[in-house]
Image (spheres, rainbow, N blue to C red):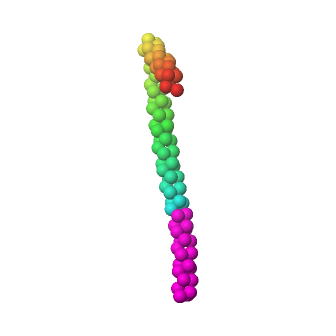
Amino acid sequence: MSDAYEREQQNNALLNSLSSKVSALRSVTIDIHDNARDQDTLDHTSDVFSSFSTNLKGSATRLTRMAKQGDSVAVLKIAGMCIAAGIALYIILGWIF
């Protein structure tokens, strides 16, 4: 009977050890998943800023081309709209934050 009790104790100890190892492995797996998700978010953010940069360069190129053509009224209109949009954005963000 003592031998069976001793084996049961060993089984319990091994089971507890295995349980802690599985818990540690699960924790590492969750950390890896979270890290991969964060990396994907960073990659997506980088793509968005790259696209924004490309669009902004294209807009600046078109504005420069229009300014070189001598249509100063159109350039002033666009500059006024940009300034008005900037001021409106500043006011709106001031209310929000």
Q: Position of residue 33 (x, y in %)?
A: 49, 55
Q: Which residue is at the front of the view, 81 or 5?
A: 5
Image side of residue 71 versus residue 16, left or right:
left
User: Quick check: can you spot residue 82?
Assistant: no
User: Which residue lies at the image location 54% right of the left edge and 75% below the top edge?
Assistant: 12
Q: Position of residue 61 (x, y in %)?
A: 47, 27
Most distant residue in the front direction: 1
User: Quick check: can you spot residue 1?
Assistant: yes
Q: How many tags in the picture?
A: 0
Residue 34 in the image: above or below residue 55: below
Magenta span: predominant SS is: helix
Most distant residue in the top direction: 73
The residues colored magenta run: 1-24
User: Which residue lies at the image location 46% right of the left edge and 38% below the top edge?
Assistant: 48
Q: Which residue is at the front of the view, 81 or 10?
A: 10
User: Which residue lies at the image location 48% right of the left edge and 22% below the top edge?
Assistant: 92
User: Which residue lies at the image location 54% right of the left edge and 71% below the top edge?
Assistant: 16
Residue 77 in the image: above or below residue 89: above
Which picture quadrant has residue 71?
Answer: top left
Q: Where is residue 23 in the image (x, y as percent from the top left)?
A: 52, 64
Residue 53 in the image: above or below residue 67: below
Q: Does the magenta stretch include residue 5?
A: yes
Q: Does the magenta stretch include residue 25?
A: no
Q: Which residue is at the front of the view, 7 or 71?
A: 7
Which picture quadrant has residue 74?
Answer: top left
